Image (spheres, rainbow, N blue to C red):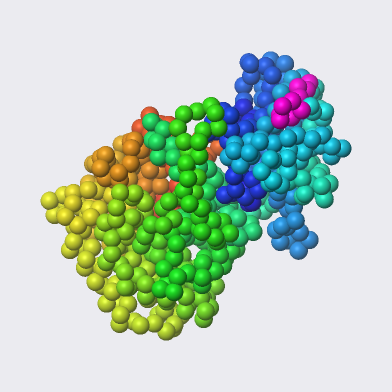
Amino acid sequence: MKTTALVSTHGSIDFMCYPRMDSPTIFAALLDKEGGQFSITPCSADFTSKQMYLPETNVLLTRFMTGDGVCELVDFMPVVNDSKGKLSQSTANCVIRAVKVLFGSMHLSISCTPRFNYGRAGHTVEQTTRGFRFVPDDGAAPLLLHASTSLACDRGTVEATVKLSEGDTLCIVLGAEAELAEQKIDGEALLSDTTDFWKRWSSQSSYRGRYREMVLRSALTLKLLSSSEHGAIIAAPTFGLAESQDGSRRWDYRFTWIRDAAFSVYALLRLGYTQEAEHFMQWIANRNRDCASDGSLRVMYAVDGRPVPEEEALEPFGGSTGSFLIGNAARDQKQLDVYGALLDAVYLYNKYGVSISYEGWRHVARTVQYVVAHWREADSGIWELRNGTRPLLHSRLMCWVTIDRALRLAEKRSLPAPFSDWFAARDEIYRDIHENFWNPERNSFVQTPGSTTLDASVLMMPLVRFIGPQDPRWIGTLDAIGAELKVDPLIFRYTRGSTLDGLPGMEGGFSACSFWYAEALARSGRVDEARLVFEKMLAYANHVGLFSEEVATTGESLGNFPQALTHLALISAAYRLDRDLDGTHVPWT
């Protein structure tokens, strides 16, 4: 919960930012073969690999099988509770790779080739009594690689070929030299502590429904994407993974979007994880306290709450064509929908967590006043359109949510508020949506006034309780989305066309939208149809239950990975389906 690593089925760490989730990469072979990697893989070309998480943990197990032997590779980042049961922040920020041969023997190739600062900085390697030091040329902190076997250095790469027999083990640790130098790393003990930590965390989940395994994996993924230090929740741990099969649309998602993170709070509260919700609410309270004098917030922030870096093109490391983007230009956009997600999270946290403070309400009320004053304005919206602003239905909808939730909270907690102004604004937005975003010829709500463009973000309308799930207007909209934006279970974000968002390439179905669609179907009473869509979507997870941002009609995963928004939409849809399939109905309160 400080950084993340993506491991291939062949035992190679192919993507890792260090020391933080939004830091520069040290391994990026996922994007470019020259981007650096850390591999432990059989020398034999004829091997089979299987991969899984240890049950109810984020500890990854990769098994290699050949005709001569069976070997296990366990990858984890240590996380330990202190003597008081609190998460220890003193545990070294490192990755530990432990190997054990279970049967026969196996020759393994070990190779660690970091490429610092997105491949822009060279490095030297120095062998010491503690291991190998990787010293970046740009002055960044050195890394230390320590192994329980002999390694050698060749032109910036630390490598070895070893033969292990049944019962043999080896352990390799990679992390900041300054941290590893101060601690004695006991890989076996840390593995036990880390496994215990994740099992205890998983046991706190209140979900016991029919999709428990997928819901728990989604919760564990959201936890991995949260910062143990700051409480922020990032959208995805990667950048540069194309949303289009032609290789275009390569954005950087290693930041905290107010919208995505607030939705994550909703999902975690549903599962009973109030501590995670509290940590994030403290983070967002600091952003709300420090926001502009008019109450407006940024669309996204770095993990520590600072502004996201400016977007810049990163040239290829040497093995691919095309550039990648780091930073994100959407940071400067106006996206009015984020306030609705924020207020919904604040309202739910007050309902199921802790009452808002005096200072907290003052800052929230200031933000609500901003929405009251600006909801009529055009913006870039949830899809971060880069070819100009426009009045968008989803943004209007979430402005309505902003004011509605603020009114509910103020009434429930007897908090001071300009009720007449807020009621008037909420009701005006309601009428505006029904009068200006309804297209009677299409029998559907549309993306912008006077258009015929459908937008899957309207699937949020019944989910946020703006409209009854069986309202004739909603049923017409749901049918229109199913007829035009749906390909099997995949739901595309909007009516496709080269001029709509001004970007090249044809993107895939948006995974979160598919789960929103399943939930909307269930809420409208079409439970069997919803279940089929939901369970078809489950098949698009990878072999360990992780979802990408998008899916091509060919079944290929597209976009950054794993995607928080997809996993939290899965949790919400699973909850709704369980309720309907069990015949349990909760009044609409």
The image quadrant of residue 415 is bottom left
Task: Count how many numbered circles sit on residues in the image.
Answer: 0
Residue at the (23%, 59%) spot, across then down? 471
Q: Residue 232: image x %, image y %?
A: 56, 58
Q: Residue 70: image x %, image y %?
A: 71, 23
| Image-based side of 88 in relation to 349, left or right | right
Q: Residue 479: image x %, image y %?
A: 23, 47
Give the quadrant of the C terminus: bottom left
Return the residue nearer the eye: 321 or 22: 321
Please check the rendered image and state whether residue 155 is part of the magenta-colored stretch, yes or no. yes
Main SS of residues in magenta: strand
Please check the rendered image and state whether residue 558 is part of the magenta-colored stretch, yes or no. no
Residue at the (28%, 74%) spot, across then down? 425
For residue 411, say whether it is visible.
yes
Q: Residue furthest right?
A: 129
Return the residue nearer the eye: 353 or 555: 555
Residue at the (66%, 43%) spot, across then down? 138
The image quadrant of residue 422 is bottom left
| Image-based side of 434 in relation to 94, left or right | left
Compared with 410, 479 (above or below) is above
Q: Residue 326: image x %, image y %?
A: 50, 45
Residue at the (66%, 36%) spot, across then down? 122
Q: Where are the magenta residues, as a range? A: 153-163
For residue 70, say whether it is visible.
no
| Image-based side of 313 in relation to 180, left or right | left
